[in-house]
Every structure is written in C-alpha cells, then in structure tokens.
Image (cartoon, rainbow, N blue to C red):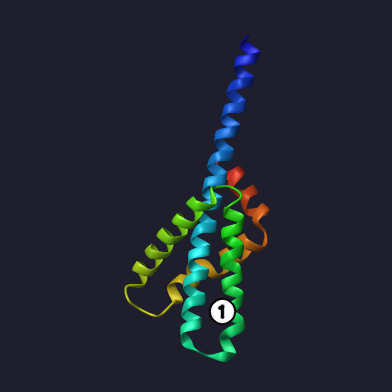
C-alpha cells in the first residue's frame, strides 16, 4: 500500500511539473507570436519593398509560434492569449514606433524558441521540477 501511495504521489508531481513546463513554454511562445505580429505589421507599414522579405519571415515566425503553442493549449485560447500579449506589448511602446525595446527582449530568444522548441520545452521541464 505504501509503495502504491509513493508511486501515485511521484506520478502526480511529475504531471504537475510537466503542466508547469508546458504552461511556461506556451506563455513564451505567445509572447513571441505577439512580438512577431507587431514587428511584421510595423515593417509592412513602412511600405519599403526591400523590407518585404523580412516582414514575411516575421509573419511566418508568428504563425509558427502560434502553431507550436496550439499543441499545448487550445487553439482558441492561444488566439485570445496572443491578442492580450500583443496589446500589452503595444501598451509598453506607449505610442512609440521604436521597436528597439521589443527587439532587445524578444529577437534572439524567440528565434531560438521557434526554431528549437523541444530544447526550450526541455529547459522548462528541468526548471519546473
């Protein structure tokens, strides 16, 4: 009986750690999707043909981040969460068109999260144990 109780407790703790890891990972993906959407829209608004490829890559990265997040959270919820994260990031810009602050925070980390999602999920799995 005691062994069964310990086994059940360990399984429960592992499930909670996985849930926490997936939540943290998905929250990051949502932040990245919002960043990529804002950046691609800003580049599109510049109406600079030489920047079209960059804007398209950012738009694709936003779609990729949403798709990955949709594996761990209901797609409808991901959509709502991205809208909320996007609004928070826009609010932090305080009317400025300067994306430097967002780029400093998200550019490198989001690139690695979207290109190597399993590596980041593994990080969160270890960090939440």
Identify whether 40 is placed above or below 72.
below
Report which residue position mark 1 lands on: 55
At 49% across and 75% down in the image, what residue appears?
39
> Foreground residue, 95 or 70?
70
Identify whether 122 is placed above or below 109.
above
At 51% across and 67% down in the image, what residue appears?
106
Residue 129 seen anywhere in this rendered image of the structure: no
Instruction: Give the number of callouts.
Output: 1
Quarter of the figure with the N terminus: top right
Identify whether 17 is placed above or below 10.
below
Q: In the orientation shown, which residue stands out farthest toward the top?
A: 1
Q: In the orientation shown, which residue stands out farthest toward the left?
A: 94
> Foreground residue, 76 or 107?
76
- Residue neighbourhood size for the residue with mark 1, other residues' Cα within 10 Å, grouped as few (<14), some (14–19), many (≥20): many
At 49% across and 68% down in the image, what residue appears?
35
Residue 118 position, x and y percent, is: 67, 52
Residue 76 position, x and y percent, is: 50, 52
**Image-quadrant location for residue 10:** top right
Quarter of the figure with the C terminus: top right
Residue 50 position, x and y percent, is: 59, 90
Q: At numbered mark 1, what does the secondary structure look like: helix, strand or loop?
A: helix
Residue 22 position, x and y percent, is: 57, 45
Residue 50 seen anywhere in this rendered image of the structure: yes
């Amino acid at each position: 009986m005691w062994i069964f109780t310990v086994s059940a407790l360990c399984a429960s703790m592992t499930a909670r750690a996985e849930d926490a890891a997936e939540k943290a990972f998905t929250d990051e993906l949502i932040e990245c999707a919002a960043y990529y959407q804002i950046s691609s829209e800003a580049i599109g608004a510049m109406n600079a043909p030489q920047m079209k490829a960059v804007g398209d890559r950012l738009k694709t990265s936003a779609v990729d981040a949403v798709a990955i997040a949709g594996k761990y959270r209901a797609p409808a919820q991901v959509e709502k969460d991205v809208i909320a994260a996007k609004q928070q990031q826009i609010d932090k810009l305080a009317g400025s068109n300067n994306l430097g602050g967002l780029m400093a925070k998200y550019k490198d980390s989001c690139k690695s999260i979207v290109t190597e999602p399993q590596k980041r999920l593994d990080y969160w799995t270890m960090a939440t144990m």
